[in-house]
Image: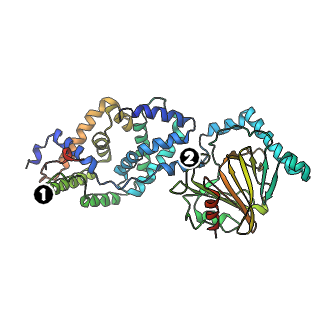
Amino acid sequence: MADPRRITDVELEGALRDLGPHYPYPPTPNLASRVRLRIAAQPVARPHRFELWRDPRRLALVAAALLVLLGAAALANPVTRDAIAHFFHVSGVIVTRQPSPLPSFSPVTPLDLGRRTTMADAQSKMSFTIAVPAELGDPDAVYVVSDIPGGEVSLAYTPRPGIPLVKQTGLGLLVTEFRGDLNPSFLMKGLGEGTTAEEVSVHGDPGWWISGQPHMLYVEVRGQGQSVPLRMAANTLIWEHAGVTYRIESGLSKADAFRIASSLP
Amino acid sequence: MEGRPLDDIALVERAKKGDVNAYEALVQHYQELAFRVAYQVTGNAADAEDAAQEAFVNAYYALGRFRSGAPFKPWLCRIVVNEARNRRTSAQRRTVLAERALVAQSSGDSAQSPEDAAEAREFRSMLVATLQRLKEDDRLILAYRLFFDLSEAEMAEALNCPRGTVKSRLSRALARLRAALPSDIRMPSLAGEHDG
């Protein structure tokens, strides 16, 4: 119709504006959940994190909570134990009921799951075979902590239909595995009011189902001067099998969490 | 649309304080733009996806240096383009993109006759292929203005150039595009007004 040399700037701009909505872009991937996963799981907002540990009031609360736990763990006398706290072990785990309200802190704190890596690399760092829940398939992200005996791996799954978002973790579901037999008192869980802990059997192995209000999860100090990651945890199914302790954190019901657990090889 | 910058300011301020939900809302809103801007540079979906994701993560960690009240969109574009440039490795990818563009099918032509729709498609394919042959800077400035609707001020920020030079750069880019068009080009009856 028109001679090419006669196309005006206005026409060409119009043609480009028309092209915009038709431009052959590939479908936009859903980046939001993956970005969220990364910023929630990696040490984000570093200044805030260090502020937590530099804040004397917060630090005192954390120290007090730890003292309660360590005290409870040391006092093996059943009478005293029941009086102070209800506590029990799965290898590598101490769960204790806090006698007073939990320290208050941000419900969303960095997960500090370790270094992000591939499944193959993670497996090479572990002294046990990583179990992936068949029901969920490959995780969206894999994290390892190599500096604890036997290693620790975390498999992170983003929210999806049937796996709701857990505000405390920013994830849908988190599976953590470590050699409980090599790490006595490695994980500590502090339960406040509104959190229930129920003794359960997973694959015939001893475990606990912790649900209700979010509870504290913190890790024993590893080495001098190392900070103590402390955060809120969601519903947790935790059990031990053949020396490996497994933990599933999610917003799932007990039945659904058990179904995921049963799909672990 | 009109209220978006205000939303952005509020979300950015919350994200700066570590509110992951606020940042996720920003990502949700801008992921299409980020991916498409990256694609303009990489010409490759996998690299564009990677670049956009990395840009969002890096932007989050850089929020502390982001001036409060500044527009988020052009700042994000700049980070995306930097990430995308890091991933664009060879001319081969551009060839792949150009080939794909030529066979791309568009939707939204239903109000046109089949002949007009086919003509419009052919014209758009030719425009895409021609854009691919332009220098990246020219392609980006045209895309910012005409595809992604950035204002002059936003373009200056995204391109990291003085605001006074945006108009002349845009005009030169348009001139180079016109010069690069095939000599037998025909302007079709465009379908833009009939879309929707």
Give the side of residue A50 with respect to residue B4, left or right.
right
Name which residue type carries label 1: Glu
Mark 1 — residue?
B115
Residue at position x 38%, y 38% in the image: B158
Report in which chain the residue with disc 2 lies.
A
Reading the image, the residue beneath label 2 is A39
* Closest to the observer, B39 or A85: A85
Q: Is residue B167 positioned above or below A177 on the image?
A: above
Identify the coloring.
rainbow
Chain containing mark 1: B
Residue A199 figure quarter: bottom right
Who's the residue at 51% across and 33% down the image? Answer: B13
- Vertically, is B1 above or below A200? above
**Type of amino acid at the residue the image marks with label 2:** Ile
Q: Is residue B119 left or right of residue B131?
A: left
**Is the C-beta separation of discs 1 and 2 under 8 Å?**
no
Image coordinates for residue B39, horizontal then vertical, percent: 36, 51
